[in-house]
Image (spheres, rainbow, N blue to C red):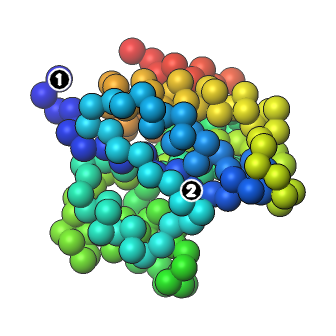
Amino acid sequence: MSDLATHILVYGYGNPGRGDDGLGPALVAALEPLHTAGLACESDYQLSVEDAATLAEYDVVVFVDADMNGPEPFWFDRVEPSRELGFSSHSATPGQVVALAREMFGAQVKAYALGIRGYHFGELGESLSEQASANLALALAFAQRAVREQHFDKYTRQFGVDSGRGCACDPQPEA
């Protein structure tokens, strides 16, 4: 396909030391060793305004985070730039970082969010709950296929928060 993005960033964020909050970095850790052409992987505890410069280097970015209340096993949606104020220099939302990348660097990055359902947050410990681990496996299979096939907007219609798929979600995108 000639319309495939050449530079994709999967950016997982969350605190691996707080149970299921580490789902974003866990997905990145599982995806990174696959060495997929055109794919970069990064993770951190949280997003920051400095991430805007990094995003500006990519065609597509997929933000990955744990979700306390979303559909199981995961959801996938478009991230729209957001100029809402209220972030500090230490933490920002995906929409705010995308907006800054556009405003400061002229970036036209397409951004998406992959929310993986977690259940146990706040407990100290670097292990995922059994349920979250199962959701991570399904989200990883989805992420691998999404990066390979790059039908990101189609996937948002299938797996978006408002898609109604939730628990009935088949992690394999429709052909």
Figure quadrant of the C terminus = top left
Q: Secondary structure at mark 1?
A: loop
Name the outermost residue toward the top.
Answer: 175
**Amino acid found under the numbered disc labelled 1:** Met
How far apart are the alpha carbons under marks 2 and 1?
30 Å
* Residue 58 visible in the snapshot: yes
Mark 2: which secondary structure? strand
Dot 2: within a 10 Å radius of its alpha carbon, few (fewer than 14), some, or many (20 or more) residues? many
Residue 19, image x and y in percent? 78, 50
Query: On the image, which quarter does residue 145 sit in?
Result: top left
From the viewer's perspective, is residue 9 above or below residue 99? above
Q: Is residue 149 left or right of residue 77?
A: left
Q: Is residue 119 above or below residue 149?
A: below
Please name the residue that numbered disc 2 is placed on. Answer: 13
Badge 1: residue crowd in 10 Å (few <14, some 14–19, many ≥20): few
Asked if residue 35 lies left or right of residue 128, the reply is left
Disc assigned to residue 1: 1
Residue 112 appears anywhere in the view: no
Q: Position of residue 50 (x, y in %)?
A: 39, 74
- Residue shown at 47%/22% (left/top)? 173
Q: Amino acid at mark 2?
A: Tyr
x, y percent for residue 162: 59, 43
Label located before the other in sequence (2 or 1): 1
Across the whole image, how many numbered discs are drawn on residues?
A: 2
The spot of residue 88 in percent (x, y) is: 54, 84
The residue shown at (33%, 74%) is: 100
